Amino acid sequence: MFHIYCPYCAEYREEEEFHPRGQAHIARPADPEATSDDAWGDYLFFRDNPRGVHHELWVHAVGCRKFFNITRDTRSYAILETYRMGERPTVTANGPEAVPSATATLTGALA
Amino acid sequence: MSKVVQFDPHPAQAAATQSPLHHVAAKPAVGETGVTLTERAFLDHLIVRGEPGVLAGAVEAVLGLELPTQPQRLARNETGSLQWLSPDEWLLIVAGGEGFRLQRELREALGEAHFSIVDVGGGQTLLELSGKHAVEVLMKSTVYDVDPRHFPVGKGVTSVFAKATAVIRRVDESRWELVVRRSFADYCLRWLLDAGEEYGIAHQPTQPAVASHRQTVTDTETVS
């Protein structure tokens, strides 16, 4: 039994209700036509695989069906915080500036 | 008023209608009845979506219900029930045949605002569990904590139910409602009959809510 706090339902819910959807805060290049193939490839296919603090996108699939973010430690699997789309993480590996801020608007649109 | 094509899902002339559980016959409890399972078929289910600030006034005016903006809340009155499903989504369940009228009134009250109302009544049905052992049957069926201390009257959640999903709501001290998908209704009913056997579960046949203009078709089999 493992519970995850959904920031929209405002309570801890069973893990079975959630699905992970990969790395969070991925910014779509503002001008795709002017983006190099390398940068576009990075955006589409390449993801971080850190040892330690990782920001992830999750969806409360059986429940409110909203996307939200989880900050998780990949060493211990501990969930350090959950926060809504468009919000900034308070727990980061290298301080808040470690996460690109331009992504907030993109992820907010998915909410 | 928004430019949306609307049609009354209930035709004026009698049309044959089948409940998703039309094929399951009544089953009395073995021994003392501890749980009663009833399907409330043919209710109108509407999904209302929009920002709470946009919807609250119209909902209050048309339904006389305060829009539940707190998570997992369920508001009820004689018109029907309105449940929070997500921060911009509510489930409105009213008597069969009332949905179209209320939908029109809501659309008129909301005017050009950004919202959506969808009739989902054909896709889901409502099961009611009552009796002193109803909560024990639910505890066997869902991962959600349905302990009465954690699940007061007027709460409703969407969660895993058996190997399907259901909206679980507590309408009063001993009555619980499950909103299940039409295609999962048979599975959920059979699960409940099996889970409730040890508590003496009785299944009553479908009770049409309001359907004077309907002709219901039943063709039952006994679940063993």
Image (cartoon, coloured by chain):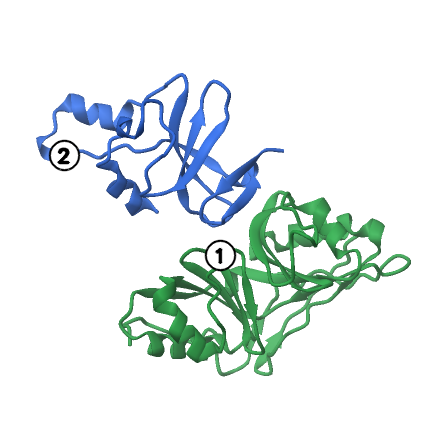
Chain colours: A blue, B green
Image quadrant assignment for residue B176: bottom right
Image quadrant assignment for residue B24: bottom right
Work out whether residue B31 or residue B224 is closer to the camera in this orientation and state it: B31
Rendered position, A23 above or below B140 = above
Q: Amino acid at mark 2?
A: Pro
Residue shown at 60%/52% (left/top)?
B184
Q: Which numbered tag is attached to residue A32?
A: 2
Left or right relative to B29: residue B182: left
User: Does residue B116 appear anywhere in the picture?
Assistant: no
Q: Residues within 10 Å of mark 1 (few under 14, many from 20)?
A: many
Image quadrant assignment for residue A12: top right
Q: CA distance from mark 1 to mark 2?
A: 36 Å
Q: Amino acid at mark 1?
A: Leu
x%, y% of residue B2? 28, 73
Say which residue label 1 marks. B85
Work out whether residue B168 or residue B72 is closer to the camera in this orientation and state it: B72
Q: Which numbered tag is attached to residue A36?
A: none
